[in-house]
Image (cartoon, helix red, strand yellow):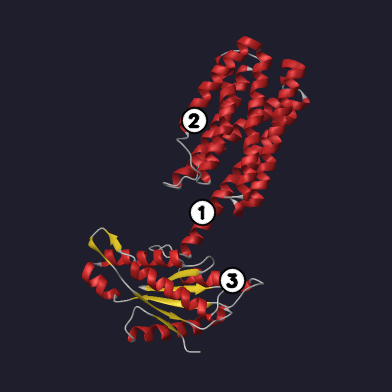
Amino acid sequence: MVTTIIIGMLCVHLLCFSVMFLLISTRLNGKKMGMDVFAAGNFLLGLAYILQLLSGPQNWGALEVINHTLTLCAPAAYALGAMRFFERPTVSVWRPLLALAVAYSLAQVLVQSLFGAEARHALLAGACAALFLAMTVATLYAGQTFARDLRVEMLIFAVLIGGICGLNASKCLIILDQGLQALDLNSSFQTTFYIYMSFLATVLPPSVVWLVLRRLTDELRNMAAHDPLTRLLNRRGLMDRLDTHFRARTASPVHLLIVDIDHFKRINDTYGHKVGDQVLRHVAEALNSSARQGDLICRLGGEEFAVVAVDTDKAGAMHLAERMRTAIEQRDVSGAGLDPAIRCTATIGVSAAFNSTQAFDESMQQADAALYRGKAAGRNRVELAYA
């Protein structure tokens, strides 16, 4: 009786969170972060438990086949939803779920006819254990690779999923040892099993919502720190990164490079602002391709960019500036409205070394002064600030 009540409450819980996930997915517009798939997983599992209460655990029939199929498809849907959340390559969600449903339904009929009801129930527990084991390993792998920023969360998820994996593996062994009486809802194992499932249904859905909120917050923070046209850092983002660099125990002095596109107003007046935007993106790509690992690249505004050269001396900063100037000059700017392609150049001013965020404004004045000397000397050149 107690276990039946637990399962009933679990059904309500799953279906309520299914509706909530679906509502959240409609508010996320084109980027649903897998919430629609999580909603489907909750719905499938909630429906499976409803069918279990209606049909009873040991009755062979269509409801029982559907019940077991939905029970296996639900965690598969969760796995596919997680892949969507982490933007991993996936095929259409519904096609593999439908294929799994058809294949497992046929497998149930075959196992029932050949080995009986015990084997069919053991098959479900074993298949779920295998699926949850794969999910546990994948979660640990994610925490070490593409989800390093969520390493602690991935470890907690792995422990929770590992728990249901262990319970399903134990259930499979108990069924094989004790037969169908192991499925008695009044048994201590079944009570423990469904209490743990209720615990997961209580903890995991809010955790998923929290992950979505964190991902949205990170994206907003990222948008606030980047220029929307070139995807480079904006000044706010540059200062944050520079502050992080100088807070490090091994922080070294840096040099500031100010990059200004030559005759940019003439380009805008001749070709239009759309081509001007293409030129800005072209320069951003040239700076990115010629920068070294760790260098900070920023669009200050208009046609002006800044590069912070780390772990280098004056000669290294000048060499980097010259490499960037050459990369900008030698690349064609092509695209819609440009036939033939055009080329642009840039003048770069390089500051003296500085070793604190507070010295940034002074270094910027140095680099600006060097930049204007380069402009006055004919443009398309690199100038070093006076010591």
Q: Amino acid at mark 3?
A: His
- Which residue does the image show at 60% across and 46% down from the upper left? 142
Pick the front one: 381 or 217: 381
Tell me the mark number nearer the camera, choosing from 1 and 2.
Answer: 2
- Which residue does the image show at 44% across and 75% down from the upper left? 321
Where residue 168 appears, x then y in whole percent?
69, 29
Where residue 13 appears, x then y in whole percent?
60, 35
| Residue 1 is at least partly visible in this image | no
Up/down of 375 relative to 23, above or below: below
Q: Amino acid at mark 2?
A: Pro
The residue wearing badge 1 is 216
User: What numbered label is drawn on residue 309?
Assistant: none
Pick the front one: 197 or 287: 287
Is 319 displayed left or right of 164 in the figure?
A: left
Alpha carbon separation for disc pair 2 and 3: 46 Å
The residue wearing badge 3 is 245
Alpha carbon separation for disc pair 1 and 2: 28 Å
